[in-house]
Amino acid sequence: MSKPLPGRAPANLPGSRGPAAATYPPHIHPGWQFAVSSGILGWILDAYYFFVLVFLVDVLAGKFHVSKAAIVWSITITLATRPLGALILGSMADKFGRRRPLIACVLFFSIVSAFTPFAPNYTAFLLLRALYGVGMGGYWGIGASLVMESSPVRWRGLFSGILQAGYSLGYLLAAVAIPLVAPRCGWQWVFLGGLIIAALVAVLTVLSPESQAWKNSRPGSLLQMARVLLRHKKDFAYLVLLMSAMTSLSHGTQDLYPDFLKTVHGFSGAVISNLAILYSVGAIVGSLVIGHFSEKLGRRKSIMLALAISLAAMPAWAFGSSLLALAAGSFVMQFGVQGVFGVIPAHLNELSPASVRSLFPGIVYQLGMLLGAPAVGIEYALRRGVGYGWALTLFELCTIVALFLIVGFGPERRGRDLAN
């Protein structure tokens, strides 16, 4: 009988289905639902604060008397500061546990975001969005490690999809808040309202048990963390490359799409919001479905399946001649794009060293965001030469091909026991 791969659960244990056993692993404790809920809800809030800006480009440009391009540039600033947050807060979560750094992080980025609409000028606005990027960057590594370490192994793929679907749900909440909240209370309240959710995340985290996986493998010092990172530098470089390409896929298909619909097709704000709600639902469903089936198909095959779905949706997504075609194309496109991301929390945590499971995937994720940050600016610039539709298409086609190659030749450790 062949031996299982290192870090991999045996595939044929009695009563099990593949690598995910049918019983809870020993590191799962009562109250794990609070930990999973807090990690997921915090990521929803994080994404909400990011995407609110996408729907307020014109409003913010008018408030600060700058061009739309200057507001779009603030997206790059936010993405660029995220690795700093991953480094600071990720190392804190590996050193001191998941719960306290998570609470500090969610309160920090929420308070900073609440101040954003009251910035006195464009420079202050950029500073606030840069600080928000620090908090946003710190959250994913902590939240993902808490959710993955607290989840029963057999549900890891599902909770991976639910966690990453939180990003799309944040987009959906932003799309809903703009037409519902802004006309009645003022656009400033789409930022202020998030403080209520932040308080709920903090309460859920207080009720959560500390991760047993962290207790079993906590590092002794920052120097020890650095040594672990150096020992795994090849895996680190590969995963940064993977996340850079995935950033281009995600932000390249999302951030400019509302402006594309307005500029090219002349849709009203209400129509664009409704379309955004529709394709956000597609993104949520894709993340859940692909994340769940990655337990059976494997992480890599599931990612490549989702990429194929996005590729098939591209003609209708970029060149649909009717509202119905654009709606269908955008729904299927985001089903595939966020289906890819639905696998990522489980995949990165399974490939990460146990003693730096907040720091390692957090930095990988956010460095990928940094290196992929110019994607939005590149697409926006390309539209002048080839048109908006072709700019989106050519950029994303190259990204999808690159991801097929990166994922196809990459590693996988599906079903790994995260407590060791």
Image: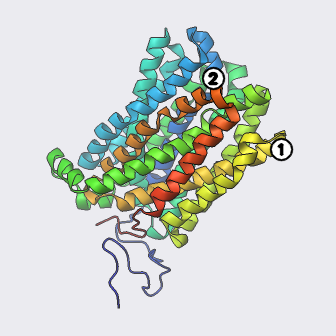
Q: Amino acid at mark 1?
A: Leu
Residue lying at 28% horizontally and 58% vertically, measured from the top left: 353
- What's the residue type where badge 2 is placed? Leu
Residue 102: percent from the left, percent from the top?
38, 42
Of marks 1 and 2, the one in the foreground? 1
On the image, which quarter does residue 251 sit in? top right
Q: Nearer the viewer, residue 377 or 111?
A: 377
Please state the horizontal and vertical placement of residue 46, each as a whole percent of the image.
50, 37
Residue 207 seen in render? no
Q: Is residue 79 shown above or below 189?
A: below
Residue ID for mark 1: 324
Specify the label residue 19 is tagged with: none
Q: Which residue is mark 2?
A: 56
- Label 2, secondary structure: give it: helix
Of labels 1 and 2, earlier in sequence is 2
Looking at the picture, does residue 373 appear above or below residue 225?
above
